[in-house]
Image (cartoon, helix red, strand yellow):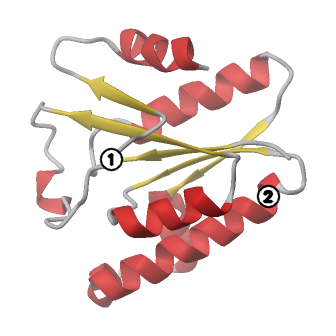
C-alpha cells in the first residue's frame, strides 16, 4: 500500500507549489507519484458554482477526494493531494481509517492576493504529520527542505 500525502491549508498558502516539488522528488527517486490538486479537480468536475462552497458540499467533496485518493493508493501509487480540506473531523476520520495518510499543514502569514478565497471556518489540524510555513522570508527551497527532512 502506497502513502497518501495530503497537503492542506488555505488558498494561496503554497500547497500546490510544495506538492509539485514533492512529486518531482518522488519521480526523480524512482517512486512515481500522482499529484491531485484541488483547483484542477474542481475544473475537471465543474465544481466551481457558488453552491459548491457551502460547508455541506465541502464535506462531501472532501469525502469524494478521500475515496479517490484511497483507491489510487490501494493500487500501489503514491498520492500527493493538495486541497483546502477545511474541516478537522472529516480529515481525522480519514486519517483514523487508514495508516497511510500523512497530513501536511501548509500555512503562511504573507498576503498573497487569494485571501478573498479563504474558508472562514477553516479548522487547523490538531496534530499534523508536519506543519510547513511558507513565505515570511523563506524561499520555496527552504520550505521544501523542511518537508524533505521529515520524509
Of mark 1 and mark 2, the one earlier in the sequence is 2
Q: Position of residue 54 (x, y in %)?
A: 27, 84
Residue name at image x 68 percent, y 71 percent: 67
Q: Is residue 150 left or right of residue 28?
A: left
| Mark 2 lies on residue | 72
Q: Is residue 47 visible?
A: no
Question: Looking at this view, is 81 or 1 the one in front?
Answer: 1
Which image quadrant is residue 90 in? Answer: bottom left
Query: How would you rate the neighbour count of disc 1 (Cα within 10 Å): few for under 14, some for 14-19, many for 20 or more?
Result: few
Q: Position of residue 38 (x, y in %)?
A: 48, 59
Comparing labels 1 and 2, the label whose residue is closer to the camera: 1
Task: Label 1: state its secondary structure.
Answer: loop
Q: Is residue 68 visible?
A: yes
Q: In this view, does 106 lie to the left or right of 121?
A: right
Residue name at image x 52 percent, y 67 percent: 93
Quadrant of the drawing holding the C terminus: top right
Q: In this view, does 71 lie to the left or right of 104?
A: right
Residue name at image x 57 percent, y 64 percent: 94
Q: In this view, does 134 lie above or below 48?
A: above
| Mark 1 lies on residue | 126
Q: Distance between the residues labelled 1 and 2?
A: 26 Å
For the view shown, which residue lies furthest in the right direction? Answer: 75
Question: Looking at this view, is 33 or 104 the one in front?
Answer: 104
Q: Is residue 4 above or below residue 130?
A: below
Residue name at image x 59 percent, y 27 percent: 22
Q: Is residue 67 left or right of residue 16?
A: right
Question: Looking at this view, is 25 or 98 the one in front?
Answer: 98
Amino acid at each position: 500500500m502506497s502513502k497518501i500525502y495530503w497537503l492542506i491549508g488555505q488558498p494561496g498558502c503554497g500547497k500546490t507549489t510544495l506538492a509539485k516539488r514533492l512529486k518531482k522528488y518522488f519521480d526523480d527517486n524512482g517512486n512515481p507519484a500522482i499529484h491531485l490538486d484541488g483547483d484542477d479537480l474542481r475544473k475537471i468536475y465543474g465544481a466551481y458554482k457558488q453552491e459548491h462552497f457551502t460547508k455541506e458540499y465541502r464535506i462531501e467533496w472532501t469525502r469524494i477526494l478521500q475515496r479517490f485518493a484511497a483507491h489510487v493508493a490501494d493500487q500501489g501509487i503514491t498520492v500527493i493531494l493538495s486541497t483546502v480540506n477545511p474541516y478537522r473531523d472529516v480529515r481525522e476520520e480519514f486519517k483514523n481509517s487508514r495508516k497511510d495518510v500523512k497530513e501536511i499543514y501548509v500555512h503562511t502569514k504573507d498576503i498573497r492576493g487569494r485571501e478573498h478565497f479563504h474558508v472562514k471556518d477553516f479548522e487547523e489540524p490538531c496534530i499534523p504529520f508536519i506543519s510547513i510555513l511558507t513565505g515570511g522570508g523563506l524561499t520555496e527551497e527552504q520550505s521544501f527542505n523542511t518537508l524533505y527532512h521529515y520524509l
